Image (cartoon, rainbow, N blue to C red):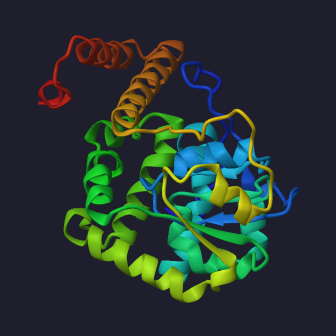
Amino acid sequence: MAFQPYTPKPITDVFTADTDIDRRKCQRTVPMKVLALGLGRTGTASLRTALKELGFTDTYHMMSASVENPPDCLMWQDAFAAKFDGQGTFGREEWDKLLGHCQAVCDWPAVAFAQELIEAYPDAKVILTTRDVDSWHASTAKTVDWRANDPELKLVAQWDWGAGLYQPMLKRFWDTFFKGDFKKYGKSVFNDYYAELRATVSADNLLEYRMGQGWGPLCEFLEVPVPQGKKFPHTNDTDGFVDRCKARNRAQMMNVAFRALVMGGGVIAAVISASVTFHRLGGRFSAFRA
């Protein structure tokens, strides 16, 4: 849903630590220096941590919208509407509002706007994290494709503030970028995307990077010192991704239950609380709904 108005985080959302910054009222405060435009599940979370270690603060990532500041999703929806639906405009001014606190950006949904970001920030260096397409597809199927189609997230999004902002944006991005069928089109989209970026960015402003190469190539490209005595970060593996998402669902369910209790909705609160307990005991959510 594009052009959805900003609404503050409910004071009853005590089980999540999200902020509620309205980016539409923000502006650029630091220069954009790095566009890390590799697809998610190519080490983007590790790269984000590495860039922060190197002083590129902040580095935007899907987690910025999913678990840090969900109202960002409103502007991402505006960007989708402008590019894919012809509704409104989304140019440098809007990117500066959404990403103005960041010196770098990586991961999805930013990759859906790779060309627009390159045009908006022509002086930024471009990094393409990559990996074998088959291993990437297998990893993504178990993580982000699962999350984009997670029935539990879709359900809690009907009531929870953060999930209600994030789930529609994630679904819009996923279906748009992968033509409505990740399993069928994922590999071809991957290959076409990387070919297009290689053809777009000049070789002297492009670093193709694979996890495992360490600090050396990255620091040389960015012209910064190699951190001494620090291993290159490794974060967001498959198991950790799924566990964090499920924990996020539980916390948002608790937000809904608490709000219902505060507002006097005892029956709703009891149902949601029961669902949380049911999951913790190992039950199947689909069975609970049936």
Q: Position of residue 150 (x, y in %)?
A: 29, 43
How many dots with numbers?
A: 0
Which residue sits furthest bottom? 199
The answer to whether one can see residue 85 in this image is no
Residue 215 higher or lower than 163, as above or below: below
- In the rendered view, does 149 fall on the left or right side of 51? left
The answer to whether one can see residue 247 in this image is yes
For the residue pair 207 and 267, the one nearer the viewer reads as 207
| Residue under the image location 52 percent in, 80 percent down | 197
For the residue pair 16 and 220, the one nearer the viewer reads as 220
Residue 190 higher or lower than 256, as above or below: below
Q: Position of residue 105 (x, y in %)?
A: 65, 59
Q: Which corner quadrant of the image does residue 97 belong to?
A: bottom right
Which residue sits furthest right? 29
Q: Position of residue 238 (x, y in %)?
A: 35, 39
| Residue under the image location 75 percent in, 80 percent down | 122
- In the rendered view, does 77 fall on the left or right side of 34? left
Q: Position of residue 280 (x, y in %)?
A: 28, 13
Q: Which corner quadrant of the image does residue 119 belong to?
A: bottom right
- In the rendered view, does 245 fall on the left or right side of 111? left
Residue 277 higher or lower than 131, as above or below: above
| Residue under the image location 66 percent in, 54 percent down | 216
Q: Which corner quadrant of the image does residue 281 belong to?
A: top left
| Residue under the image location 12 percent in, 27 percent down | 287
Quarter occupied by the C terminus: top left
